[in-house]
């Protein structure tokens, strides 16, 4: 019974954490620019969560997180929904089968998630629609610095989810 209550409490903390990060992303991070770079803290959060969650739960969490992001932004392309669902499922599968569950793996997986997110965003929305200069400006002044800026957040989220994982099992 105590383990069930603990898991329920951790689930509530997860929900609260995702809600808070999404809320901060759409309100506070507007002022957290370094140059044109803006952090996308939801990617490291989803990476840390997915490393310790089963594939199906990770995919479901990525789906609803992306759906929420697309809904808030009024984006009808569903880019975030599709990308975050697939990324979360892949990260969970890689963490279970290929990577160890340590901080180095979390950094690599979070970095890869950010690289692919900004690359596919560029490919879908900038590469063929914008001119060469706008496309290059997006990559050099926004995407690459944002990838590095986003990566900083894994150092806060991974230890938290590692602790959650230990609390669930104990």
Image (cartoon, grey):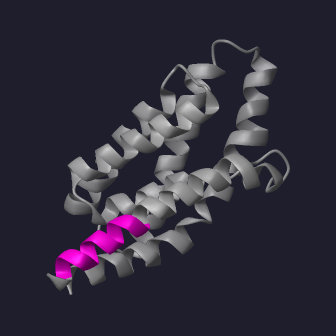
Q: Quadrant of the C terminus?
A: bottom left
Residue pictured at 60% horizontal, 35% vertical: 72
Q: Position of residue 135 (x, y in %)?
A: 73, 24
Q: In the drawing, does residue 41 fall left or right of residue 67?
A: right
Seen from this angle, which residue lies furthest bottom?
Answer: 170
Q: Position of residue 96 (x, y in %)?
A: 22, 61
Start and end of the magenta stretch? 3-13
Seen from this angle, which residue lies furthest right?
Answer: 35
State whether residue 17 is above or below residue 77. below
Q: Position of residue 116 (x, y in %)?
A: 50, 40
Q: In the drawing, does residue 85 fall left or right of residue 113?
A: left
State whether residue 165 is above or below residue 128. below
How many numbered marks appear? 0
- Give the quarter of the image for residue 142: top right
Q: Nearer the viewer, residue 60 or 128?
A: 60
Residue pictured at 39% horizontal, 45% vertical: 62
Q: Quadrant of the N terminus?
A: bottom left
Q: Nearer the viewer, residue 150 or 65?
A: 65
State whether residue 77 is above or below residue 72. above
- Give the quarter of the image for residue 136: top right
**Residue 5 sits inside the magenta stretch:** yes
Residue pictured at 59% horizontal, 60% vertical: 151
Q: Position of residue 78 (x, y in %)?
A: 48, 25
**Residue 20 sits inside the magenta stretch:** no
Magenta: main secondary structure equals: helix
Q: In the drawing, does residue 5 fall left or right of residue 76?
A: left
Seen from this angle, which residue lies furthest left?
Answer: 1
């Amino acid at each position: 019974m105590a383990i069930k209550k603990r898991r329920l409490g951790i689930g509530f903390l997860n929900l609260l954490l995702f809600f808070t990060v999404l809320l901060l992303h759409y309100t506070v991070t507007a002022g957290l620019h370094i140059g044109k770079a803006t952090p996308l803290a939801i990617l490291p959060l989803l990476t840390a969560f997915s490393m310790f969650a089963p594939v199906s739960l990770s995919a479901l969490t990525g789906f609803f997180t992306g759906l929420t992001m697309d809904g808030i932004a009024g984006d009808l392309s569903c880019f975030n929904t599709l990308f975050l669902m697939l990324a979360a499922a892949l990260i969970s599968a890689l963490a279970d089968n290929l990577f160890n569950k340590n901080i180095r793996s979390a950094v690599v997986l979070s970095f890869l998630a950010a690289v692919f997110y900004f690359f596919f965003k560029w490919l879908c929305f900038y590469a063929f629609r914008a001119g060469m200069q706008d496309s290059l400006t997006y990559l050099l002044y926004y995407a690459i610095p944002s990838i590095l800026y986003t990566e900083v957040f894994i150092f806060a989220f991974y230890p938290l989810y590692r602790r959650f994982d230990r609390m669930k099992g104990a």
